[in-house]
Image (cartoon, rainbow, N blue to C red):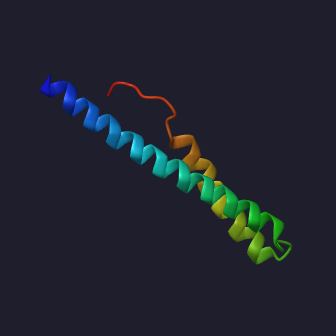
Amino acid sequence: MEYHKELEKKLEKLRKENKRLEDENASLWFLLDELEKSNIANPEYRELFEGVYDKLRFQTLMITTSEGEA
């Protein structure tokens, strides 16, 4: 019974963290969309945008979307 309660607490904590990360991810995609719509013809801005975009793509690949056993 106690083990079940601990698992429920851990699961709830993971759900909250997942929600936070999903919100952060959505915010970053919104920011990237806004950057893309802005003037990125300037090579300096283009380089910065591509760097941020590449980092975001890499981080997205590192996020797991399903639960598994460790």
**Residue 21 versus residue 64: which sits nearer the camera?**
21
The number of numbered discs placed on residues in the rendered structure image is 0
In percent of width and height, residue 22 lies at: 54, 48
In percent of width and height, residue 56 lies at: 61, 54
Q: Which residue is most to the left?
A: 2
Eyeballing the image, is 42 above or below 11? below
Q: Which residue is most to the right?
A: 41
Relative to 7, is 29 on the left or the right?
right
**Residue 32 versus residue 47: which sits nearer the camera?**
32
Relative to 29, is 17 on the left or the right?
left
Quarter in which the C terminus is drawn: top left
In percent of width and height, residue 4 lies at: 21, 25
Quarter in which the N terminus is drawn: top left
Task: Examine the image and state in which quarter residue 51 appears.
Answer: bottom right
Relative to 2, is 45 on the left or the right?
right
At 42% from the left and 28% from the top, the residue drawn is 67
Eyeballing the image, is 61 above or below 67? below
Task: Examine the image and state in which quarter residue 2 appears.
Answer: top left
At 69% from the left and 70% from the top, the residue drawn is 48
Task: Examine the image and state in which quarter residue 32 appears.
Answer: bottom right
In percent of width and height, residue 30 lies at: 69, 59
At 45% from the left and 44% from the top, the residue drawn is 18
At 54% from the left and 53% from the top, the residue drawn is 23
